[in-house]
Amino acid sequence: MITAKKLRNLEGANYLPKRIQMQNNKVTIHDIAKALNLDSSTVSRALNDSPRVIQKTKDIVLAKAAEMGYQRNHLASSLRKSKTNTIGVIVPRISRHFFSSVISGIEETAYEAGYTVIICQSLEQFNREKKIINTLLGQRVDGVLMSISMETKDYKHLEVLKKQGIQLVFFDRHCDIPNYSNVLIDDFNGGFEATEHLILKGCKHIAHFSGPQNLEIYKNRFKGYKHALSKHNLPFEEALVFPSKLMEEDGRKNSEKLLALPNPVDGIFSANDVAAIGAMKYLTDNGVKIPEDIAIVGFSNEPISTVINPALTTINQPGIEIGKAATALLLKQITKENGALDPQTIIMDSNLIERQSSKK
Amino acid sequence: MITAKKLRNLEGANYLPKRIQMQNNKVTIHDIAKALNLDSSTVSRALNDSPRVIQKTKDIVLAKAAEMGYQRNHLASSLRKSKTNTIGVIVPRISRHFFSSVISGIEETAYEAGYTVIICQSLEQFNREKKIINTLLGQRVDGVLMSISMETKDYKHLEVLKKQGIQLVFFDRHCDIPNYSNVLIDDFNGGFEATEHLILKGCKHIAHFSGPQNLEIYKNRFKGYKHALSKHNLPFEEALVFPSKLMEEDGRKNSEKLLALPNPVDGIFSANDVAAIGAMKYLTDNGVKIPEDIAIVGFSNEPISTVINPALTTINQPGIEIGKAATALLLKQITKENGALDPQTIIMDSNLIERQSSKK
DNA sequence: ATCCAAAATACAATCGATTGTATTTTGAAT
DNA sequence: ATTCAAAATACAATCGATTGTATTTTGGAT
């Protein structure tokens, strides 16, 4: 008996799609209206649960819509409403774990609010960033969340967004220009903590792998480094600062230069984990003991930092939370209909995770 | 002199946006038409470089459009043309390096062809996968590229796409159902090579960390494993197969069980790198020497596989090329206007990368 | 049975771009 | 100067959903 019932259900489930297949082309509210001898406006209101349509009619419309396999045409709806319920996200690259976790947070919050997310990668290239913004404008996104590329020094391309009334919230890699909202961690404090941690472990000559100084985050991590030195009465030496794009290869090259210094270095604060890993590989290959000879602290808590041996001490950035907070802020700004939208900057907590690479 | 010129240019560049700002709202072809005393249809055709508009007019229109900061409304255009030039991509999670590199390939090819990409993560959940497909349908994507989730065993949700005439191409994690195109690597051969490699290194008792057997890729890697054993006259033992979802934690747990076996294992072929890494961490922590006691081979060549010590031998999958090939195939299918579109399966090359974890 | 406000639904314009058809303009041939 | 096909442009419908306004329907009060 149960089997028969199941069978019938299965048949039903199978037949429905077939019927849809027959009428090949997409079902519109007009088709539903025609089928029910109603006006398309009533169907539209019924589907949108408007109080102007009686419940009985709503039920009928909903049933028919389901039966016919109706699916709202987002394009038409957005065009009419001048609102796409879509947000654009621009990150340097999705393969960085930090960014992919931010994206997970963004998607979660956006999805709950009924928004679709378009993810784009600048791949650290300014030109791609400009093109992406144009694409997103063409797609008529309601807002944009972004972390700028390492090459970005000029912010004119962002003004178009403001001018078209498209909300913009930066996360992590922000711009130091007024009237924009940000969701950040305290990079100054992160840089400070990382460096002080090395100092407290007994390091006296601490090198810093710094990132492009046009980015606020790297500027602030650098400032934090300097502040920790001065707080503990250690001299700041320009020669110990190695600027780069912080790729793995940069970490290697910096280490090579660093080993050639007359005064041996006993600690490294790298502004990201990737360069720190590059350094660890190079140093280990060249007989340097980590952390005994040189202790290392990275930044971002990428998953590789737990895989490398010794595991890398680093500053943890709460990616998912940053994504959620940035999205919530953006949606608030989008919703607040042109009202006074005073830009906000939210600082999220970050913390140092101590691992083997700094255990002296 | 040069400075003055530069200054003027800068001023010009500054003024333009300001003018745009004045007229706050978005510029349409109608605005351009009005400004030039032309019809909007002519403007549209001029902007689309139609042969029905004389070059002189095109120049005028283009200039005016640029001056007014016009940007085509993709929604209106797509609605009218019933073509969005958008493709949806569904992956289990973007944080897996393999998938993010596939996405890079997809974006590159799609972008060149003038397509926008919407990236979605199923997070290995069947329900999310279903919702995503509905979202993409609502967005009226022209085609979909996907790698199914580990939970996906039922393919009804995919039929809707076919029925709506939306092209679908699988990559990597495909479905074994007819009439769909695929871009894959030879997983059987990958599993075979990985296992044979261990055998040639002298392993006699090789365990296999297998993935969910509803996925073809894991089924085939498993088959490759068995085939290598039989080719080399080694017995297949059910007890040496550890099925799981291949997360890091699974690698750990499998290793624990594996160490408890009466007959000691001397090699592991893991169907992905993540579980292999989990195993390496557990085994190393428990005094097992890799590769001396147990040699290990993973699958996918995730970046962590070069960071772990010893570095992990693995099967390399050309992510970017897979992404490019899948996109090219999809676009071909989209463009081929309803013509006979015989489904195709493209097999990409994969290769074993030998590292320390299997150097006996 | 009649009336009327409230409730329910229908009508019609609109969002912005595209495209088939119709009209005007051009310029070469007579 | 006239004619006419070709060239250039204008007109108008359309994509599908939304929404302000207008009309019809309902059911309670008289």
Image: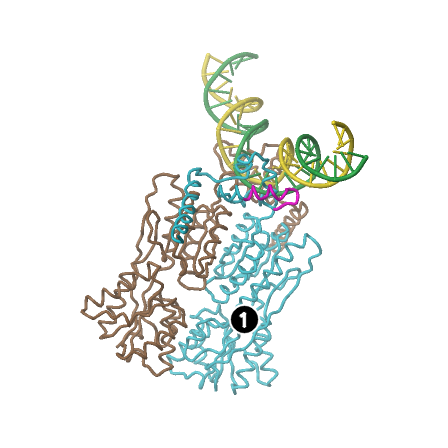
Chain colours: A brown, B cyan, C green, D yellow
Q: Nearer the viewer, residue B92 or A81?
A: A81
Q: Is residue B214 visible?
A: no
- Rendering coords of residue B145 (x, y %): 57, 59
Dot 1: within a 10 Å radius of its alpha carbon, few (fewer than 14), some, or many (20 or more) residues? many
Question: Residue beneath label 1, please?
Answer: B317
Residue under the point 48% across and 40% down: B26
Q: Is residue B56 magenta?
A: yes
Instruction: Name above or below for residue B176 compared with residue A113.
Output: below
Dot 1 falls on which chain? B
Which quadrant would residue B257 be assigned to in this image?
bottom left
Percent position of residue B111, x then y: 55, 57
Label 1, secondary structure: give it: loop
The magenta stretch is: B49-62
Q: Where, by quadrant of the figure, is residue B29 drawn?
A: top right
Residue B269 falls within the magenta-colored stretch = no
Q: Please give the name of the residue rendered at 37% of the width and 59% of the height, measured from the top-left corner.
A: A319
Q: Amino acid at mark 1?
A: Gln
**Residue B288: where, in percent of width, then height?**
41, 83
Q: Nearer the viewer, residue B65 or B91?
A: B65
- Evaluate whether residue A237 shows in this view: yes
